Image: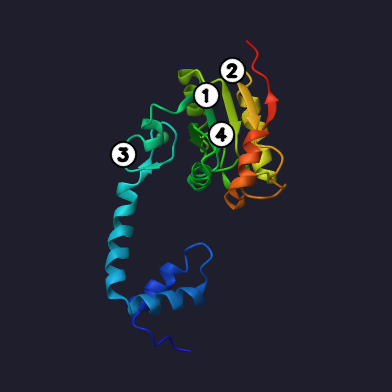
């Protein structure tokens, strides 16, 4: 059957269907909706075009930032002795919104997955070690989701930090196995922070 849509519309549908969770049908619906909202098209078009140029990774923690350093890294009132490791900026935002943590963060962006080509380099583990040394961090809190790949990544990080004199803890009870951090409610997350489990004591 011939596709009777104009070429631009067809191309938009094909581009939208490359987004995660959007199949061809949803892409078609979105494209037709956009067609009826010229103002939204303009705003979205501008934002999408600027996105890769404006939003970078913070030089210290790898959180999203429009400047060299993100607002958290620029905030001198936070607790420098704690560094919380999260998988992605979404989880960082989730923890920040829960208002339960006042230390700094480090964002991995990936979990270890040799199959997908995500190794220690992609996770920025060398920079993480430097940061812990520079900041004289006394506790590293692993706040990775208790999924299989989250657990594997946590174990690898504990090993990687073996040579440093730093206490390593991970979020504990309350987070059911398999649950991703971003879906935990603030109370569960708070409990997981409070009852975090020590994986390695600091040996000086
Ligand atoms: Zn930062």
Q: Which mark is residue 181?
A: none
- Pick whichever of labels 3 and 1 is earlier in the sequence: 3
- Pick whichever of labels 1 and 2 is earlier in the sequence: 1
Query: Disc 1, disc 2: CB below 8 Å?
Result: yes
Disc 4 element:
loop
3D distance between C-alphas at marks 3 and 1: 23 Å
3D distance between C-alphas at marks 2 and 3: 30 Å
Q: Which residue is mark 4?
A: 120
Q: Quadrant of the C terminus?
A: top right
Disc 1 element:
helix
Vertically, is 153 above or below 28? above
Q: Which residue is mark 3?
A: 67
Vertically, is 104 above or below 183? above
Q: Counting other residues with Cα less than 10 Å from the Cα at mark 1, is it few (<14), some (14-19), or many (20 or more)? A: some
Residue 109 visible? The answer is no
Q: Is mark 4 within 8 Å of ligand 1?
A: no
Q: Which mark is residue 164?
A: 2
Q: Position of residue 79 (x, y in %)?
A: 48, 26
- Pick whichever of labels 2 and 3 is earlier in the sequence: 3
Q: Which mark is residue 129?
A: 1
């Amino acid at each position: 059957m011939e596709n009777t849509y104009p070429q631009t519309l067809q191309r938009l549908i094909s581009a939208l269907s490359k987004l995660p969770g959007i199949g061809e049908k949803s892409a078609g619906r979105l494209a037709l909706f956009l067609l009826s909202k010229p103002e939204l098209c303009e705003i979205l078009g501008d934002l999408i075009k600027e996105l890769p140029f404006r939003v970078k990774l913070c030089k210290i923690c790898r959180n999203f930032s429009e400047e060299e350093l993100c607002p958290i890294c620029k905030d001198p009132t936070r607790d420098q002795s704690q560094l919380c490791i999260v998988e992605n900026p979404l989880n960082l935002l989730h923890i920040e919104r829960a208002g339960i943590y006042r230390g700094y963060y480090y964002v991995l962006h990936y979990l270890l997955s040799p199959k997908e080509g995500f190794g220690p380099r992609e996770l920025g583990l060398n920079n993480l070690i430097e940061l812990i040394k520079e900041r004289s961090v006394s506790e590293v809190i692993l706040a990775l989701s208790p999924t299989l790949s989250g657990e594997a990544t946590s174990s690898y990080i504990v090993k990687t930090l073996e040579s440093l004199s730093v206490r390593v803890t991970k979020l504990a009870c309350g987070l059911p196995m398999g649950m991703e951090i971003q879906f935990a409610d603030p109370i569960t997350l708070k409990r997981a922070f409070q009852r975090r489990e020590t994986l390695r004591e600091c040996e000086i």
